Image (cartoon, rainbow, N blue to C red):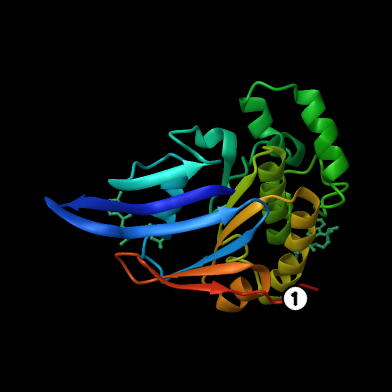
Amino acid sequence: MAILELVNLTKYYEVNGNRLPVLDGISASLGEGEFVGLIGPSGCGKSTLFNIICGLVKPDGGTLLLDGREGGSPRDVVSYMPQKDLLFPWRSVLDNVVLAREVAGENREAAKREARSLMPLFGLEGFENSFPAQLSGGMRQRAAMMRTALARRPVWLLDEPFGALDAITRKRMQRWILEVWERFKQTVFLVTHDIEEALFLSDRVYVLTPRPARVALHLEVGLSRP
Ligand code: ADP
Ligand code: ADP
């Protein structure tokens, strides 16, 4: 069964009294544990789509099914990692990554124990008490990803997670994210501008048209992973 299903989603923005379409009937389906890429020119509506999926923006038409249910709470199903990492600069790495669990009112110490055990996988061992400004760009992205992991939701929306990194770091992070995916078996919906990245990582790729976004192409990739 699909964990995330978008059925004919439409969205308009009001600009100077005009209703301008941004999403023109987007349908897509993501199965449990799938890695799905989303590609489209900048400004086509990808962030709008992610904002709809995580409940920050209301669609004007269509249906969003989370774990098979309409009107379910995105908080139970989706974790959103925005394009710009949103680590709080005044919090240590450890205090940043347990944030979702803290906000959910869960036991801080249990969350911190789990975070400590995940530090090696996220390449942050020894940096638990460092602050974001003391980390490299790659480490900050990995910390943001750990926070997403610790939120323990089955669907991860990743908006250009490697976009701001240099080419070599990006290559290493692309291989690394597959290890994370092996470990958590989460469903990933990954926005990227990089077609090669999408083909390397994904089971399937949706390609969107320029605004207003429609699905122009749906590729079954099926490349063997390393
Ligand atoms: P992408 O993530 O693909 O770059 P966005 O979803 O951010 O695209 O934006 C799609 C289009 O909608 C852009 O042209 C953007 O300028 C416009 N847009 C985004 N948010 C708003 C808003 N709140 N009001 C009006 N226009 C918006
Ligand atoms: P990149 O951001 O290029 O991926 P890495 O995160 O792989 O770099 O960093 C490699 C190693 O270098 C880290 O595991 C860490 O030990 C060390 N390192 C990187 N940046 C810093 C830093 N700002 N302060 C201290 N050590 C660092």
Q: Residue at x 72, y 73 (%)?
A: 171
Q: Quadrant of ligand 2?
A: bottom right
Q: Local crowd at mark 1 within 10 Å, few (<14), some, or many (≥20)?
A: few
Question: Could you tell me residue 101's position as x and y percent?
Answer: 68, 30
Q: Is residue 68 left or right of residue 97?
A: left
The answer to which image quadrant residue 213 occupies is: bottom left
Question: Could you tell me residue 180's position as x and y percent?
Answer: 77, 55
Looking at this view, is 202 or 106 the one in front?
A: 202
Question: Could you tell me residue 75's position as x and y percent?
Answer: 55, 34
Q: Residue at x 44, y 51 (%)?
A: 6
Q: Residue at x 74, y 56 (%)?
A: 181
Looking at this view, is 67 or 174 the one in front?
A: 67
The answer to which image quadrant residue 220 occupies is: bottom right
| Residue sticking out furthest to the front | 1
Q: Is residue 223 left or right of residue 10?
A: right
Mark 1 lies within 8 Å of ligand 2 (Cβ measured)? no
Q: Which residue is mark 1?
A: 224
Name the image quarter holding the C terminus.
bottom right
Report the amino acid beneath label 1: Ser
Question: Could you tell me residue 200's position as x and y percent?
Answer: 67, 74
> How many badges with numbers are in the image?
1
Looking at this view, is 122 or 191 the one in front?
A: 191
Label 1 SS: loop
Q: Residue at x 80, y 31 (%)?
A: 112
> From the viewer's perspective, is residue 31 above or below residue 75?
below
Q: Is residue 187 left or right of residue 213?
A: right
> From the viewer's perspective, is residue 45 above or below residue 87?
below
> From the viewer's perspective, is residue 190 above or below residue 80?
below
